[in-house]
Amino acid sequence: MMFLLLSLLLTVGEANFNILPVVPFPQEAEMISTVRRSLHVEEFKITTDKLREDKVISSTISRYERYFERFERGPASPDGYVTEVSVTVADPTAQLKIGVDESYTLNINPLSPVVKLAAKTRFGVVRGLETFYQLYNITDGTFPSVKIKDYPRFTYRGFLIDTSRHFLPVDTIEKVITGLAMSKFNVLHWHIVDDPSFPYYSPTFPSLAEKGAYDMNHVYRISDILQVISYAEDHGIVVVPEFDTPGHTLSWGKGLENFLTHCPGVGTFGGDYGPINPSVEANYQVLQKLLAEVTSLFPSGFIHLGGDEVPFNCWAANQELVAWMKKQGIQNFNDLESYYEERLLDIVHHLNTSYVVWEEIFNNNLQIQPDTIIHVWKDKWQATMGKVIKAGYKTILSSPWYLNYISFSRDWKTYYQVEPLKIPGATAEELNLVIGGEACMWGEYVDATNILSRTFPRASAVAERLWSSEKRTNVADMEFRLDKHRCGMCARDIPAETIILRSYCPVEFSGYDHW
């Protein structure tokens, strides 16, 4: 009877607070006993046959062993202690990419000191050990007896950072990645350059950063990029860079002559320059060389090409460009943008990489290739996504998940109640084209001082929507689990903000001096 009651609590009846405070909640969780086993910190270890020297496995094991080191041994238990997690991986050669198998099973047996964690790939181990950590009750030092079978609902579960408006040091980006892994995100969308600054230091075009960055202390060199990519891989996270064009490129023009459209008084922010000038043939050579460098550096197999908010008024004010359009038979500025995007996508196509664009590329009826992924960010997202998938394109949702917009009280509840597949009139086949979503933290008022507390645990509400079953929608249950998850993040030196009017963490955030 007890077994049946516990199973019902986990699979059907979400009216009660969940006895497994895990975020995102697993796809399947079955309580096998009411017995709880204590943790023997001094003897605890994570073991794996043949894979201890693997970079991802070794760093993950070391990380989670370190997480448990700060706790004391649990109370003596007649059923004994948990002393070991035994890890097995079916395919240890699978490489990190969007869509890699992240599934795992976890078995905490009340009759054994050894916890069994089995995964298809190394990245399932990363996800499974996070669940194991969250199952630990900080207050009494015990684990529940449970069997878990888990896998993500969507293959793309992203988070955007913006390092142009405000620079983020590498160690801050790594802290963001650490927090993202705690909620099972798998993509870091790095909006690395924009109008305000060009912090990417390109060996091919060094003048872009030398003249376009805030200063040379605020740039990412190749070694910094590789460090971030390597760190992200150890956390099961793919880094997707964004080089947004033809708009949002004011910082590019400082280091490249004739790259931007000259339009005195009507350019970006009322200045003299606007988007890339599509009539200058040399500009496409610059783009080809730069993007070839970028795609060879980032192993994700994806690049985000932007394409949003292109100000046509600057193009219209440049008479040389308008005359060139007439010679080319280009009738209007939508067609001019389409000309530019066709040239750009042809460049990227030959670089053998997948690409994402903001929704304007689709909304403006530009000619795009069938494998283009449309990133939806504006209002009325259901209607837009409906049109995108009916046209046969894959899509990613961000519209309701702009975390840089903050409000008093618990805005995470609004994020949590979004259902990405609630698209009227869409067929099951069309809905398969919704590959996931992305929370965004734009940098207008965000830098290293506040990005972590502003992101976590609010982003975790989005993470659960993208990982867990669509049936898991009880806000009260999520609030209980999210509060526990927030404390678990604080215990691991992530300054996640509180989400409840009155509460406390058994292990409080220990302060920035530990970083």
Image (tube, rainbow, N blue to C red):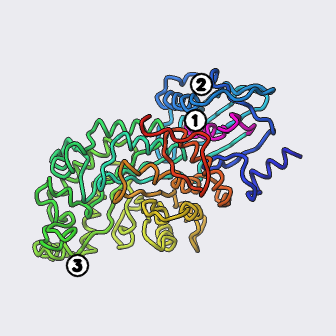
In terms of secondary structure, where does tag 2 sit?
Answer: strand
Q: Amino acid at mark 2?
A: Thr
Q: Earlier along the polypeptide chain: callout 3 or callout 1? A: 1
Distance CA(mark 3)–CA(mark 1): 55 Å
Seen in the picture, residue 422 relative to 2 is either above or below; the reply is below
Q: Earlier in the sequence, mark 2 or mark 3?
A: 2
The reply, left or right, for residue 464 in relation to residue 59 is: right
Residue pointed to by mark 2: 48
Residues tagged 3 and 1 counted as in contact (Cβ below 8 A):
no
| Residue 145 among magenta residues | yes
Which numbered dot is residue 125? Answer: 1
Separation of disc 2 and disc 1 at Cα? 11 Å
Residues drawn in magenta: 124-146
Q: From the image, which quarter does the C terminus lie in?
A: top left
Mark 2 residue crowding within 10 angstroms, few (<14) / some (14–19) / many (20+): some
Q: Which mark is residue 331?
A: 3
Q: Amino acid at mark 1?
A: Val
**Horizontal side of residue 402 vs 272, given as left or right:** right
SS under mark 1? helix
Q: Position of residue 454 (x, y in %)?
A: 45, 54
| Residue 179 visible somewhere in the drawing | yes
The single residue placed furthest to the right in the displayed view is 1
Instruction: Please check the rendered image and state whether residue 140 is part of the magenta-colored stretch, yes or no.
Output: yes
x, y percent for residue 400: 49, 65
Neighbours of disc 3 within 10 Å: few (<14), some (14-19), many (20+): few
The answer to whether residue 395 of the structure is visible from this angle is: no
Residue drawn 59% across the image and 58% down it: 501
Q: Are marks 2 and 1 in contact (CB under 8 Å)?
A: yes
Return the x and y of residue 346 as percentages of the image width and height: 29, 57
Residue 275 image point, x, y percent: 21, 65
Which of the two discs, 3 and 1, sits closer to the camera? 1
